[in-house]
Every structure is written in C-alpha cells, then in structure tokens.
Image (tube, rainbow, N blue to C red):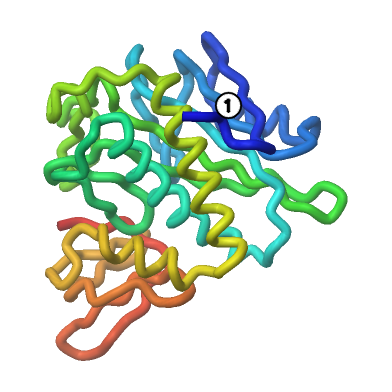
C-alpha cells in the first residue's frame, strides 16, 4: 500500500494531543498532512470530552486547507468515516460487524470502536484550516465507567476480532482510503458519499433518540439529507437535525 501523493506524514512518539499539534502546525504547512501520535497525554473528543488513549491505540489528525463554504467543509466527517471504514476492512480483511453511526463514529459488533472530530483552525489568507481527528481503539477500550450514561459500550479491534494492528499500519491504510474518498468528494460532490455512507449506516430504519444540549427527539432514522442532517420521522413530523448525540 503506497502513501498518497500530496499528503504529508508526521509520526510523533508523544504529544499532548494531535488536534492541539494540528493547531500549532497549521500555519506552517504547505499542503494536507497527517499527524500520528504513538502516545497522547491530553486527548479529547466531541464537545470537549476526554478521550482515553492507551498505548497501542490510534490517534491521528489530518490537517487540510479546504476552500469550500463551511457547510460543505463539514461534510468531510462523512468522507472521513467512509475512509476509516475502508481502512479497517483493509487491515483486518473483514467488513462484518462494522457500521457507521451518525454523525461520526465507527461501530464494531454494536460497540463504539472509533470516533472522528472535525474542528476549524481559523482563517489564514482566506483559507480555513480543517483538522480531522481520528481515534480508534486498536488495542484497548475504555471501561464502561469512563463513558457517559447511555453511551454505547466501547470496544477494541483486538478484543472483537483478534486482529492486532499497529497504529502505523492503520495510518497507511487510512491515508490511502481518505485520499481516494476526498478526490471523489471534490469531483462529484456529497451525493455519492451520502449514498455510500447510508449503505453502511447503523440502525437505519430503526428508532433512535437524538439528544442536543436542550432537548431530545425520538423517531425512526429515515435518512441523512443532502446537507448531512439526520432525518428522523416522528409521530407528528419529519425532522432534520443538524447536530446531536444519537442513542440507540
């Protein structure tokens, strides 16, 4: 598997977090670059939550300089999750049990294997830097007491499949898969990405609860619309939800 042309690679023995390192490096980069940390000391996930990263797990961030409008840039969460799905298939040789949870988690056998976090790093000469953080429980998963109540059980790749995969090996597969999906996204737009994502979606057609900071909506997971919103069909209406935590 060859490293994709045009993408930089930086492997760090230890860092506070790859997202923080992305913020420090963004202004110095000439093109997109992957940052992999073999150990993180202050990692975080969505909404500022702590992200536990034992040795042997995967923690990386891709720094990009996209030029589209913010709403289009945000759709790269779907691009990244598709790429991670494909990378996991490539390193394990199996797709069984893998699925994608809106908006940006990868599940294995119904448990949370990986999470993806997108952050804007601010404008520079008219270009917004985007950081796409990826965390995967390759070797170990947090305990049930380390996640919020109601959240999916964390799982690790090795415990669920027996596949021992080094972080560097997953990075090779992920970088190649991401470059392929990114090129398709830029060329053809969100439509094909959306279709591919829905084909791998967890709980499509089933009842889920979408919880924001202020409210909770329960309904049938009908689809993801052309702007990336979760669409739930409730007893009274059909509701598009732009951002929420989803519970099964």
Identify the residue shown where x is 47% and y is 17%. Answer: 40
Instruction: Quickly name the residue at label 1.
Output: 35
Task: Find the residue positioned furthest to the bottom.
Answer: 236
Task: Find the residue positioned furthest to the front.
Answer: 1
Q: Quadrant of residue 25?
A: top right
Residue 100 percent location from the top left of the image: 28, 53
Task: Find the residue positioned furthest to the right.
Answer: 125
Identify the residue shown where x is 56% and y is 69%. Answer: 188
Give the answer, above or below, for where 205 lies relative to 110: below
Is 4 left or right of 195, judged from the image as shown? right
Residue 168 percent location from the top left of the image: 44, 19
Q: Which quadrant would the C terminus be assigned to in this image?
A: bottom left
Mark 1 crowd level (few <14, some 14–19, many ≥20, 10 Å Cα): many
Nearer to the camera, 94 or 37:
94
Identify the residue shown where x is 36% and y is 69%. Answer: 195
Q: Secondary structure at mark 1?
A: strand
């Amino acid at each position: 598997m060859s490293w994709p042309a045009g993408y930089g690679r930086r492997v760090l023995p230890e860092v506070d977090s790859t997202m923080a390192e992305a913020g420090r490096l963004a202004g110095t980069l000439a093109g997109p670059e992957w940052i992999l940390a073999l150990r993180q000391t202050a990692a975080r996930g969505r909404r500022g939550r702590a992200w536990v990263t034992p040795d042997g797990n995967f923690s990386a961030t891709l720094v990009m300089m996209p030029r589209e409008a913010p709403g289009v840039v945000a759709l790269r969460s779907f691009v990244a999750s598709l790429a991670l799905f494909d990378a996991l298939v490539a390193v394990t040789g199996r797709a069984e049990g893998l699925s994608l949870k809106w908006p940006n988690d990868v599940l294995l056998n119904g448990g949370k294997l990986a999470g993806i976090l997108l952050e804007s790093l601010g404008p520079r000469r008219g270009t917004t830097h985007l950081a796409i953080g990826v965390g995967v429980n390759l070797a170990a998963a947090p305990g049930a007491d380390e996640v919020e109540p109601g959240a999916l059980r964390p799982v690790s790749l090795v415990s669920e499949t027996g596949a021992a995969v080094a972080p560097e090996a997953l990075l090779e597969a992920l970088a190649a898969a991401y470059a392929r999906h990114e090129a398709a996204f830029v060329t053809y737009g969100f439509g094909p990405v959306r279709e591919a994502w829905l084909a791998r979606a967890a709980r499509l057609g089933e009842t889920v609860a979408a919880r924001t900071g202020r409210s909770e909506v329960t309904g049938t997971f009908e689809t993801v619309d052309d702007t990336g919103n979760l669409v739930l069909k409730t007893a009274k209406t059909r509701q598009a939800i732009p951002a929420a935590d989803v519970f099964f």
